[in-house]
Image (cartoon, coloured by chain):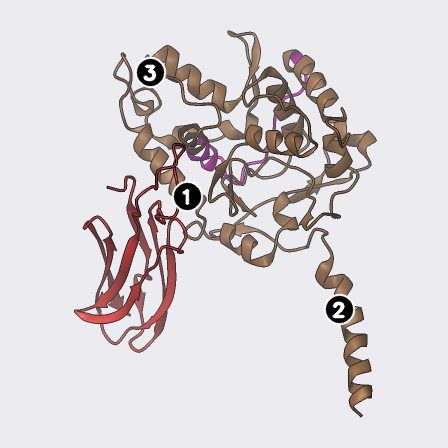
Amino acid sequence: MKLKAMTALCATLAVAAPLAFAGGPDDDTLAIDGEEMVTKTDAPAHMEETGIDTVMSGWHFREDDTQAMQADTFDNPGMIFVDQAVDMWNTAEGSAEKSCASCHEGPDSMEGVRAVYPKWNEEAGEVRTLAMQINDCRTERMGAEPFKYDGTDMTAMEALISVQSRGMPVNVAIDGPAAETWEKGKEIYYTRFGQLELSCASCHEENYGNYIRADHLSQGQINGFPTYRLKQAKLIQQHNRFKGCIRDTRAETYSPGSPEFVALELYVASRGNGLSVEAPAVRN
Amino acid sequence: MASGVKPRVKVPKSASAGDAITIKTLISHPMESGQRKDGDGNTIPRSIINRFTCDFNGENVIDVKMEPAISTNPYFEFEAQVPEAGEYKFTWYDDDGSVYEETKAIAIG
């Protein structure tokens, strides 16, 4: 009798185990404060050769508890930094004694901005990330010290600007003058780095849904950045995450804000064209 | 003095008498444990929120003693029964003597 019960238990475990340990994406729906997000959509046309038909937000690869934190703005710890950035937004700094609000009025004037960045800047003749644009405002218009590229102040400000576009589809331009930078980013994406000889694609294109040691591999989408990472208890920027990934391949990394990472950001962002801006997302 | 401390509370605006409601609270605070050392090897002094209380119309609902192992930006979620219309008062006590307060009114309806 006892043996029989044990066998039955083993059988149940064997059936349940693959489900419980599967690292693949789930089919849940993300609604932030009731507003539904696009977290799965058809891959953009330029991804035809990649073998990926559906692009998926990293949200689908996380556990239910982590997912739930993002669904309620109050529960989302990233919003603390958004609040801090609101104070910064209204604080005049620098020789011009201007704040963000002096030119841009309320943060809601930034609606739609996050969705199209990184973006070609005609005047500067380069592709600019949101962070570069923020620092340009600070040094050129405010006469203030630039923020550290991936520092706390910068990521908070990016989060505040990003949250204005929450729910809007990512739509970065990859043609025209941005094409050259995009190609460069693509090349970096497929270049194997480090002693482990891993490219971005090795994990996030060929093996998403599988485990890397104890963690799920996502598609490496950046529509949720800056992202609140539970293990670091703070907002993490795209470039910071790129750096972490490249470091883990045991390579010397590029610096946050370097032209290489700007190009990579444009390319990775374009792989998420069509997904909702989720920033600040919550991940582990 | 801890900087950037800001309490936030989420309480429904109204409830039926006798209902149990969910209250969520969060306070941004570094919660420096007192166990860490800086670059020169000196101990960073402890600076945490050591107590959190919630009162409803003067009656205590919850009283929490907090220890250094609690992580940054402490978050509390709990249920409370609403006997009548009134006001919730939330109080956080900092190691440095600062007291942070927040109040939320709730109506019956």
Whole-angstrom CA distance, mark 3 to mark 2, is 58 Å
Q: CA distance from mark 2 to mark 1?
A: 37 Å
In terms of image quadrants, where is residue A225? top right
Residue matched to label 2: A16
Q: Which chain is red?
A: B
Chain corresponding to brown in the figure:
A
Within the magenta stretch, is there residue A175? yes
Q: Main secondary structure of the magenta part?
A: loop
In this rendered view, identify the residue nearer to me: A35 or A78. Answer: A78
Mark earlier in primary sequence (3, 2): 2
Residue type at tag 3? Ala
Please report whichever mark, 3 or 1, sits nearer to the chain's N-terminal start: 1
- Residue that carries the numbered disc 3 in the rendered image: A144
Q: Marks 3 and 1: same chain?
A: yes
Name the residue that disc number 1 marks. Answer: A79
| Chain where mark 2 sits | A
